Image (spheres, rainbow, N blue to C red):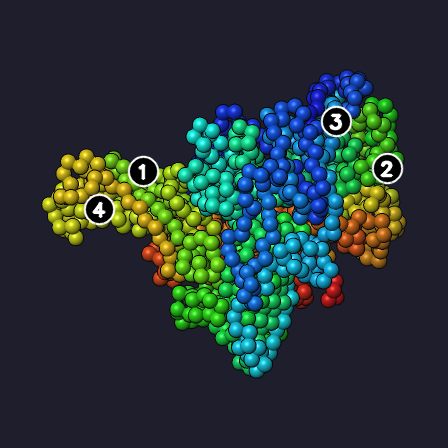
Amino acid sequence: MYETQYHRATSVEGAARLMGEAEDGKYLAGGMTLIPTMKQRLASPSDLIDLRRIEALKGIKIDGRKVRIGAVTTHYDVSVNEELAKICPAITNLASHIGDPQVRNMGTIGGSIANNDPAADYPSAMLALDATIITNQRSVPASAFFTGLFETALEPDEIITAVEFTTPDKAAYKKFPNPASLYAMAGVFVARSGDRVRVAVTGAGENGVYRLKDAETALASSFGPSALDTLSVNPDGLLSDLHATAEYRANLVKVMAKRAVAEIANRPM
Amino acid sequence: MGVEGIGARVLRKEDKRFITGKGRYTDDMVVPGMKHAAFVRSPHAHAKVTSIDAEAAKKMPGVIGVLTGKELKADGIGNLICGWMVHSKDGSPMKMGAWSPLATDAVRYVGDAVVIVVADTKGQARDAAEAVEVTYEELPVVVNAVAAMKQGAPQLHPEASGNLIFDWDLGDEKATSDAFAKAAHVTKLDIVNNRLVPNAMEPRATLGVYDAAEDHFTCWTTSQNPHVARLVMSAFYNVAPENKLRVIAPDVGGGFGSKIFIYPEEVICLWASKKTGVPVKWAADRSESFLADAHGRDHATHAEIAFDKDNRIVGLKVQTVANFGAYMSLFSSSVPTYLYATLLSGQYDIPAIHANVKAVYTNTAPVDAYRGAGRPEASFVVERIMETAARELKVSPAELRRKNFIRSFPHQTPVIMTYDAGDFDATLDAATKAADYAGFEKRRDEAAKRGKLRGIGMSCYIEACGIAPSAAVGSLGAGVGLWESAEVRVNAVGTIEILTGSHSHGQGHETTFAQLAAERFGVPIDSVSIVHGDTDKVQMGMGTYGSRSGAVGMSAIVKALDKVEAKAKKIAAHLLEADEADIEIKNGDVKVAGTDKSLPWFQVALAAYTAHNLPSGMEPGLKEGAFYDPSNFTFPGGCHICEVEIDPDTGTTEIVQFVAADDFGKIINPMIVEGQVHGGLAQGIGQALLEGTHYDDSGQLLTASYMDYTMPRAQNLPSFNVMTTETVCPSNPLGIKGCGEAGAIGSPPAVINAITDAIHNNDLTMPATPQIVWAAIQAVK
């Protein structure tokens, strides 16, 4: 790791100010991507501005079906939130399967979304849930937030403060992990509210998370795993690497989508 | 057996310090004035080094020295060597290319060390290493051994034309061809034994200290054999004469073979310490470990096995191309030859075998011994082809094996080895019974109803441990003898120190070796200390690898214990006024048999040191040493059965049952043996399902971190069902065979046999990841 200056911010405004003063600053949340990257000397920010101690960014608030999750809430805290599990078990279940216990106790939802790793779990949930990403400057719908591999609509000094969404009637997330890293090689989040179905895919797309609109259409007319039997997932545009060719990923997307739909169909809520 | 003697499940004495973080490893060592090293390593797989400009680096903060291969050569430091001579079938010696500890004119794999930087801190050393400007002229690259043999392939070393190190034969080619000519059935198989990265939990590290006042070097290092390290660094690398070089291998966090070899970093840090005048420490990070530790396996093999009309094996032909990487590591040449082809007879009575092995240079990390070293590769060939043959012949895989078992011992195979003992029916029976092999088809049908593909596979492996009779390995080209030494020191109060040339890096020697003394003298194991890993304390030793610490290391201790016991009895007989033949040592007392006359053990020891009343002419003291040279290899063997369920939609394999029935001969501590088997199975299953090492065409290691290299996790492994049968090994005084590698040797073919059974496609490469299995399912749909 190269030498860097560490700052512990106590307010969002203070963090933004520190960023403005830094030569080449980076916000730090759980650090689950940034710190290993720095340790490998692949990143060398002049300043690290730690957001984790900012009270305003912490915690989960639930009002009826409206959910607000503070940006520095850890995956662990999401995974064990009983109130959230009652109204949206898909999201707590997703959080409980991110990485390993160490990662879940350090990594945060804001960090995951801001990094937009093409294999991260949360972006698929945000997209399928039509979540709103709240920053210190504005509110951005998830559909406009994730713009490409490790790319988002965030400005360099912008800070995610929370995500907000209304829980769907039913939802489920199924992923197939990379055997080594445990990141998703195909993760499919399915959310259903009335006739509206959202299917979002992570881990597979060359440009990161995306909606599988063919599946949404098929499921809107007939919701059940068999509705996807004839679904053809095109390998073009899918990632291809050592662990999964595009063809294999296309298969996984379909299998995970069907399993997520089956879980919803078989679950009372 | 006493409560702590041979056969007792004694808890490991060393575990308290390990699990409380109190182990003392090389990187924990701190000496006054110590500085830190970082290496500049080649980013290219093959290039000429045209210039090195260290001026900017030398001016960086904290930098003490920036040293290159030219300076190393100028000081007379020798090239690294391979210590086992293998001759090609035409009689010519192996073609060893020069391996300078620091590259001078060329680099040949990504990670090849080029420059060492010494600085006040590790961070400063790394910063300065980045400031060293090395100019490379890139050369064409070859990473695959078969491709490297082709005409026009890039050439790595001028010494090895066509990149061919040797073209070696074993067995009778004509007799084998004749057998095939008369065969009723021939089964053919092409298989790859995948390259593995060792991944010991503790990365390699070394601390080189030059003492100018004494003109003496001390090397702390992560070694499985510190005495061999001293010998090689002294005799071949010209670091210092042996009396001026002390090597210490303190606690070592796993080796698996990868810490047998003397690596460039140890030599360079010692030399750099003298050159810079400061102690120099280097500790690899995990990325360096991936790039620059010796890898394991990497064979491509074509095999054919011939049967007569009664399904008896009449012959076996094996052709293997072994990827050696960019340089010949210390024992690399022995692995795909005398540790591999000599085991191709497996558990079977095969009248004719012929093996050909071609050893090839490529632009990849050097390849050498890794847990099992040649024997996993052999058992993979034999047990995959036996299972394949059974399927082709439409007979039970278990019965085909049983029909061909060796049942008479000693048995001379056509490939050098003389098996001394074994009962292969016993391990097969134990495993098939435990696994309910006969009831499998019901389980397959039941799984099919759940949409799962269920399969079963077995492996009846044999291996050779207790390496090895010195004269025998000498005649086969080994540069060293493979005996072991021990010294037993009984202190004046009766406590005991056992000095051993074996080295413990996870094996539990502090417990099992103490159990030998507990058994012999009835003393508690807490009063027995094991001393190892320091060339100043232990005179000489050959170290730990090839599951040899038990069969060879403990046999040396037994010989020394014999001498101590004999002397103690003489003293006791004198003190008790009895006949020496009537003295017995039991439960900590030295008694005259059939009488109530006895002395506590410590009084005999005390008498030896007070020397007030010793038999006439006897020297004081109670301390004896011994060297033990084994009369044969030992031959552990067993039967592993793996049962899998596969999700056909994703290709995911779940091991639903794994049974290992092993014959390790006599067992000193069953708990430690089970632990060894569990660990070995985890590594074997890791090879079969998870661990793939991939270089791209430009020689970059794609699987250079845990993001891409899959180590086995608990969730990948079933609860193992392990058991042992026993035939006593006649070739050593304890009757033991060795257990350290069996799990890794026996399990990969069992796993792959099970998966290929489940998916009805025999064409499956390791590691059988979900993607590979899914594709193999699609291929036969």
* Closer to us: B570 or B229: B229
Q: In the picture shown, does residue B253 fall above or below A28?
A: below
Residue where numbered disc 1 is placed: B527
Label 4 and label 3 in one chain = no
Count residues near mark 1 (Cα–Cα under 10 Å), then give few for <14, some for 14-19, many for 20+: some
Label 2 and label 1 in one chain = no
Cα gap from disc 1 to disc 3, whole angstroms: 56 Å
Q: Give residue A147's mark.
A: 2
* Closer to us: B702 or A133: B702
Cα gap from disc 4 to disc 2, whole angstroms: 83 Å
Question: If the image is split into quadrants, where does the C terminus of chain A sit?
Answer: top right
Label 1 and label 4 in one chain = yes
Looking at the picture, which amino acid does disc 2 mark?
A: Thr
Q: Nearer the viewer, mark 4 or mark 2?
A: 4
Local secondary structure at mark 4:
helix
Q: Give residue A45's mark.
A: 3
Q: Nearer the viewer, mark 3 or mark 2?
A: 3
